[in-house]
Amino acid sequence: MGTFSGISTALSSLQAQRVAMDVAGQNIANVSTPGYSRQRVEMTAGIGVDVSSIQRLHSGLLGDRARTESARLGDLNVTSAVLTQIEQVFPEPSTSGFQSKLDALWSGFSNVSRDPNNAAARIQVIAQANVLTGWLNDAAEQLTTISTSQSQNLSNLVTSANSYAQQISKLNIAIGLTPEGTSAINALMDQRSFAASQLAEAVGGTYLIDSANKMSVSLGGAAFVGPSNYATLQVATTAGTTSVQWSSNDSTAVVSSGNASGYLTAINTTIPDWRADLDSVAAALASKVNTAQAAGFDLSGNVGAALFTGTTASTIAVALTTGSSIAASTLAPVGGVASLNGSNADAMAALGRSAGGPDELYQNLVVSLGYATQGAAQTAQTVQAFMAGITGQINSESGVNIDEEMANLLTYQRAYEAAARVLTSIDEALDTLINRTGLVGR
Amino acid sequence: MTSITRLATGAQSLQNMDSVGAMSKRMAQLQEQISSGKAIQRASEDPGGTRSVMTLRAEQTRMSQYAQNIDNGLLRLNTTRTQVDSVNDQLFKSRELVLQGQASNSTASSRSALAAQIDVIASSLLVAANSDFAGRALFTGATSAATAYNAGGTYIGDTNQVTTRVGDSGSTVRIELNGPEVFGVGGANAFAVLTSIADSLRNTPANLAANLTSLDSVITTARGAQATVGSRINQLNELRDVSADRILSITGALAAVEDTDLTKTIMELTMQQTSYEAALYATASIMQPSLMDFLR
């Protein structure tokens, strides 16, 4: 044992405790940093003590599960949000919704039936028909707006997914160049797993870390991020169908989860489906009323003309402008004198109760939309709770606890003090040896 | 799942925020229910209830429409009754005049005076026959002709019925009487009979007996009309009561589905507030202390 070896032992301890205090400080500094994993100093005994590595406390398995669930949740959240927006187009039950407007139209026909020569009652029907077509046009317009905003969201999302992919790829390279077991590589790995979790929420995908610590990401088997390169996605719309494509060859990328999947479902399926239901309400209104009109005679004794034109919610319009055109009578004019019979108007008033009529179709739409919205919100909530459990476990594994860090800090500080005391003791011993011995007879 | 053994400081506050957030969301929902008075704000809150509300509201609108139809029908029938009553009175009066003309002490000049009175009755009957309700001739059937009888006392309306809807399935009630139902048919109608009575009084008193038979048959028709109008008015009055009951029960059903149960909701809100405050208090006391506070 060398004379001065004790000094280097104490020194190694001083250095190790300093590193440990730095790491505790780093942990405390990042107590609220998203994606940060706490670090721990691994010390091994040698001559003195060695800091063998700075460990990053992170479970790859939990990270994987969190990515899968957040991709699922990303999909469900978008679906639920879109349904909620669609539901707002149909504000029911209310006294000012489409149902009450339909009720008013049927009442209007009943008023004409009661009093076929009352011009006010007749013009009221035309006015109410205009209210209905106005509402239908507006609802169709709102659905278009929702669809457009989802397309916008999708293209923003794809842009940020591309930037996350690029980030992961760059971090892969940086991690390859950084020595293992250091704070620096830990920080890079935290950044990479944060980028991966954001990417998973956006587009889903499969995440693998190879033996060389490179993360690769694939979508439906096609590589998005490789060990040293990355691909780019783009949004394309062909023949009315929107898809996410690989920019390199314009082939469709498989996006089965994440926000992107939610947006794609909304744009390609959900919104068109509800629009089709709305269109069938408009078509039923037009066909039922027009058929009934054609079966009767108006105030001038002519066969009733179609009240509505157009068969979709966006194109339906009122064709008649004068109240006298309402075909209230079932009886043909006799000798040029029109009949004041109101039976046909009465039949039109009853259209509100007809099977397959606009009322029934509209009620079915509202109710099934209600169930769909409710179901989507509940599913999202369930996955949210599951996700919270996983986040809890990740936090338990990787999150910073200030109490724990303070206790560590105390330990390291005391150890540092003790090592310093050791140094002082050795110094004093050496002082005794060097300066005070061999002085006999001086 | 592994159990959570260590708690990260950040996670603690996140979890607390989640549960406090969920509570304040539920409170907002309850407050909305109380302030709007409606238990269902959106279809997704209760899709089944939404369907009930929509169908009940449609039914409510229909029932009030039927109630209006009944009131309108009653107005028209009451006007009809007034006219039919006066027609009956005048026909009775003309019967008395015929009897006076047949009396043994009647003279040519007295009969001529009676004939003049018959003429007056005939023209006043024509006014009654051409009377209108809300701009529409009362006794014309379903035509849009402005009058039921022309100046010669010939019926120019039709015999199509005018009905009004008082219920959902097939329930319509006739709310008019056409000319022939009140005044008799064709050549035997009141106007033709009165014309021939006036003629007999002036020229051929011998025909008065035959005239009286014709007049009696006209009177029978008019009295029948009186009875018909009366029974229809009764029918509509009863229907009005039924419809009022129906509207009341629909309103009740609607309130049960869509109105906020205030007692229940306010109680739930109070409970929610209590747990919200407790959660806030707990969050505040959990998040405050750390070892930092005790190390100096």
Image (cartoon, helix red, strand yellow):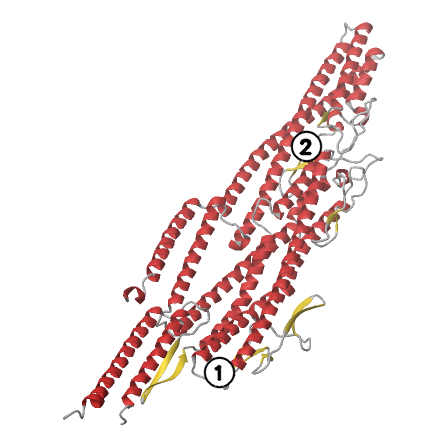
Q: Is residue A8 above or below residue B136?
A: below
Chain name for mark 2: B
Between B89 and A202, the residue placed more toward the observer is A202
Q: Is residue A23 above or below residue B126?
A: below
Among the 4 quarters of the image, the one containing residue A438: bottom left
Q: At x 60% / y 72%, what residue is drawn?
A: A162
Q: Amino acid at mark 1?
A: Thr
Between A295 and A184, the residue placed more toward the observer is A184
The residue most toward the front is: A442
Q: CA distance from mark 2 to mark 1?
A: 97 Å
Could you tell me which quadrant the C terminus of chain B lies in? bottom left
Chain name for mark 1: A
> Where residue B181 sits: x, y (%)?
73, 28
Could you tell me which quadrant the N terminus of chain B lies in? bottom left
Q: Amino acid at mark 2?
A: Ile
Among the 4 quarters of the image, the one containing residue B143: top right
Q: Secondary structure at mark 1?
A: loop
Q: Is residue A56 left or right of residue B147?
A: left
Q: Is residue A396 above or below residue B220?
A: below
Q: Secondary structure at mark 2?
A: loop
The answer to whether the residue labelled 2 contacts the one labelled 1, judged by CB atoms less than 8 Å apart, is: no
Q: Is residue A380 left or right of residue A24?
A: right
Question: Badge 1, how many Cα within 10 Å: few under 14, some, many 20+?
Answer: some
Using the rendered image of the protein, determine whether residue B37 is visible from the camera's viewpoint. Answer: no
Q: At x 75% / y 32%, what residue is drawn?
A: B141
Pointer 1: what residue?
A178
> Where residue A277 sits: x, y (%)?
65, 57
Pointer 2: what residue?
B175
Using the rendered image of the protein, determine whether residue A441 is visible from the camera's viewpoint. Answer: yes
